[in-house]
Amino acid sequence: MPRKLTPKQAKLARELLKNPEATLEELGQIVGYSDAAHVHSELEKEHVKDRVKDLMDASPKLRVPALLAKLEEGLDAQEIKFFADKGEVISERVTVDFPTRLGYLDRALDLQGLKQKDKEGSSVTMTKDVFVELCATFWATKPNDGQR
């Protein structure tokens, strides 16, 4: 039988989706927990995770297909560089936005469980085997442009 959420746990689940960039300390202050460690322990509980998932499923923008589409878009991120002289834009160039792409790749690997965990359980990096597999997949699917 699933455990019932406390009012604080229910509020934590709502606030997590409402303020996705909030730190654990900030979420704790909003919800009324004493510290970040308490918030972290609450978010690790299965019934709280289930509530977050239910709330996400209720929002079309947060359902899995929509999230996967956004993740895929982020992996193709580009930015426009502007070049100016004496206050006038003289040229612009579209370049690869590597920091944004790295952030999306990091998130995708984390969601797939393909990152190693450190002693505290934080995701730190992908395993060597996963990296080799990703590189092999990339090169196998990349069109041959004669530059390899």
Image (cartoon, rainbow, N blue to C red):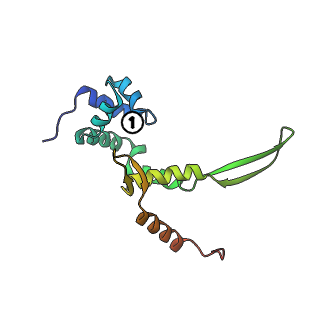
Q: From this viewpoint, is residue 78 visible?
A: yes
- Residue 108 is situated, as x and y percent measured from the top left of the image, at 44, 54
Mark 1 residue element:
helix
State left or right for residue 7 relative to residue 118: left
Looking at the image, residue 58 lies above or below residue 6: below
- Residue 36 is situated, as x and y percent measured from the top left of the image, at 35, 31
Residue at 34 percent across and 32 percent down: it is 14
Viewer-closest of 80 and 63: 80
Q: From this viewpoint, is residue 65 visible?
A: no
- Residue 76 is situated, as x and y percent measured from the top left of the image, at 57, 56
Residue at 38 percent across and 34 percent down: it is 16
State left or right for residue 46 relative to residue 94: left
Viewer-closest of 117 and 5: 117
Quadrant of image for the C terminus: bottom right
State left or right for residue 71 relative to residue 14: right
Question: How busy is the neighbourhood of tag 1: few (under 14 within 10 Å), some, or many (20 plus)?
Answer: some
Looking at the image, residue 16 lies above or below residue 61: above
Residue at 46 percent across and 35 percent down: it is 21
Residue at 42 percent across and 33 percent down: it is 23
**Farthest front residue?**
119
- Residue 45 is situated, as x and y percent measured from the top left of the image, at 24, 39
**Farthest right residue?**
86
Tell me the kind of residue under disc 1: Leu
Residue under label 1: 17
